[in-house]
Image (cartoon, rainbow, N blue to C red):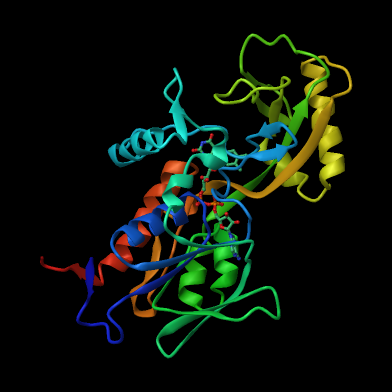
Amino acid sequence: MLTKHPSISGSPGATVAIIGAGAAGLIAARTLHGAGLSVTLIDKSRGLGGRLATRRVETLAFDHGCPSVAVSDPADLDLMAELAAAGSTSVQPDGVYLGCPGMSSLLKPLAEGLELLRGVRIAQVRRKHEVWYLRSDESDAPELGPFDWLLVAAPAPQAADLLADYTEVSAQIAQARMAPRWTLMVVPDGDLEQASDRIWFEDEVLDFAVRNDIKPGRSGPESWVVHARQDWSTANLEIGPDTARDRLLAGFRAYVPQGHPRYVAAHRWRFAEVVSPLGVDCVPDPDLRLAAGGDWCLGPHVTDALASGRAMAAQVLAFYEPALG
Ligand SMILES: Cc1cc2nc3c(=O)[nH]c(=O)nc-3n(C[C@H](O)[C@H](O)[C@H](O)COP(=O)(O)OP(=O)(O)OC[C@H]3O[C@@H](n4cnc5c(N)ncnc54)[C@H](O)[C@@H]3O)c2cc1C
């Protein structure tokens, strides 16, 4: 347990609101909860994991966001070992980690014991009398709070918007650059007879495709997630899911001949991957008891999000000291 740092007035138990239950928010929440703070983790989505996502359609499951995680940092290796013991990941022969049964499951054990608010989109944050209050986009919902600390673990443009009133922090966040990506989920009509579970394209539209039905714990018909190129996705951000689906499917069928698919849908990740990170592990403002972070601080990978989440938690813990005995 922790005691309150002498410089903080008020009640001895610190409360923390974390907006965003992706890798950064989850590891921050787990770290702070483990240290004895009272954490409320809020996400606009009903699921956990953010871009570690799995779309389920009846018996089908598509990892339509991040397809796998590569890990080398000792802290991340320890985390993966813990998650493997909990049954939410398995390491593959090529050394990458997959979520079991889907990528959205990978980090789920981190949420155990946390107060979770899912399906709640925070539209406004405000600091009043030295504490934070949060308002969702549902006009009749009560304000959330008060919280001693606020951590914002949303993609950079969304974090900058939420914190627009805190101009120094939001201006710094807004310097990070993120790119979109369209992805296509396909169940072909019959097996494609591809030797590999990953296809790389030399193409203006398509980047790569990952086979999904042969991931651990999966079954059912052959299924693929096809990733469009970032530059094409940027240029075609607003074409709509039906047009994107048709364009990506036409490209995929040109490379991998097939009949009409049994299932096909496109998903747009507006903020898929970091193209220009800030180069700092998080954006803190200790005077405001505020920190923002996510992959966009350090780089384009899940491990960057985890490092940033740990850094945000460290900002909070710096205000507290371990109780003796
Ligand atoms: C298609 C694709 C392929 C990828 N490939 C790889 C790869 O091969 N390897 C790799 O390491 N990484 C890959 N990534 C990137 C990886 O997924 C991210 O780096 C990582 O998941 C980011 O975690 P995060 O916690 O920073 O953000 P996120 O996962 O985006 O989490 C942010 C959360 O904040 C929530 N949120 C935002 N605004 C609000 C609000 N106002 N109120 C409430 N909640 C809110 C969102 O719903 C979301 O759950 C890929 C990503 C995509 C999309």
Q: Is residue 185 left or right of residue 324?
A: right
Q: How many marks?
A: 0
| Quarter of the figure with residue 258 | top right
The quadrant in which the N terminus is found is: bottom left
Q: Is residue 114 left or right of residue 325?
A: right
Residue found at the very far right of the displayed protein: 260
Is residue 79 at all visible to an observer of this figure? yes
Residue found at the very far left of the displayed protein: 325
Rendering coords of residue 198 (x, y %): 61, 20
Residue at screen point 51% across, 52% down? 22
Rendering coords of residue 263 (x, y %): 82, 30
| Quarter of the figure with residue 252 | top right
Q: Is residue 228 above or below residue 21?
A: above
Q: Nearer the viewer, residue 273 or 321?
A: 321
The quadrant in which the C terminus is found is: bottom left
Residue at screen point 27% across, 80% down? 12
| Quarter of the figure with residue 244 | top right
Q: Is residue 4 left or right of residue 218?
A: left
Q: Is residue 235 left or right of residue 207?
A: right
